[in-house]
Image (cartoon, helix red, strand yellow):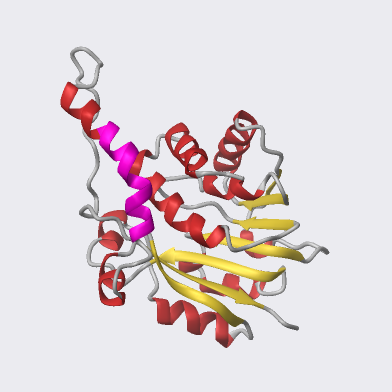
Amino acid sequence: MVTYDFFYKVSMAEQGGFGIWYEYLAKSRIFKQLHAKSVLIFGLPKKYSLGLDTLFFADNSEMHIVDDRKQSLDEYKRFAGIFSKKVKITYVKDLSSFKTNKKYDLLISTEVIQDNTALINVIKNLAHKILIFVPNSQCYAHPRISGLNSLSLKELSQLGKSHGLKIEQSGYVDCPPWPAGACLPKKTPSENKESIFLALVKRILTKITPLLSFLDNLYIPPWKQLNSHMVYCLFYNDK
């Protein structure tokens, strides 16, 4: 079983820091509910991370990654090798041109659909279950700071429904208890070492971040709507 320690290791390996670790832990609550023999990762995140949290499925599922950026795919493959995870990698010039004769048990798409909602036509028949994460347009600061296009939970839900998909689960995720855009300072340039204070902060965050990510699921809806970095929908296609 993959534990919070795994998500810490992959987030730090890709230099995502505690913010990405928090995101991965928050999303892992959804991942742990899903069981799939075959998983298609349709596009990697556009900013901040490579989405290495999806390696969660690699031990028990046949994983296939498809994206239109060779460099991102090469990096994902490199990290998959570091963590001894077997994945299939496919580069396409345009995600809208991706085709396969296989129907996957689960498709995961993170930070892709908000840039081209027409892609829903491509993915709706690729898997029995489709998990989509997009930046939350109702978050008070994250869309502005990240520069990413975004959708509201209602917009994402309606997008799937308008294309014949049914919703199994939906909500907000990645609602950190620190201000949007907050990050720890870098090592001091003179000595290239962390200060005692910074080392202490990191040690504290290492201990409490798993607990904070658990609280992510307990916040009241209005707080989630205004502070969550992402919205998600788990769709299914019963045709």
Quadrant where the C terminus sits is bottom right
Q: Is residue 214 above or below residue 190?
A: below
Nearer to me, 47 or 38 = 38
Which image quarter holds the N terminus? top right
Observer-nearest of 218 and 164: 218
Q: Is residue 156 magenta?
A: no
- Residue 186: x and y, percent? 24, 29
Q: Is residue 214 magenta?
A: yes
Give the extent of the magenta segment: 202-215
Q: Return the x and y of residue 42 as percentages of the image width and height.
A: 62, 58
106 sits to left or right of 146 = right
Predominant SS of the magenta segment: helix
Furthest-top residue in this view: 191
Residue drawn at (56%, 87%) of the image: 162
Q: Quadrant of residue 126?
A: bottom right
Eyeballing the image, is 181 above or below 133? above
- At 18% from the left and 13% from the top, the residue drawn is 190
Pinpoint residue 9: horizontal percent, then vertical percent.
48, 35
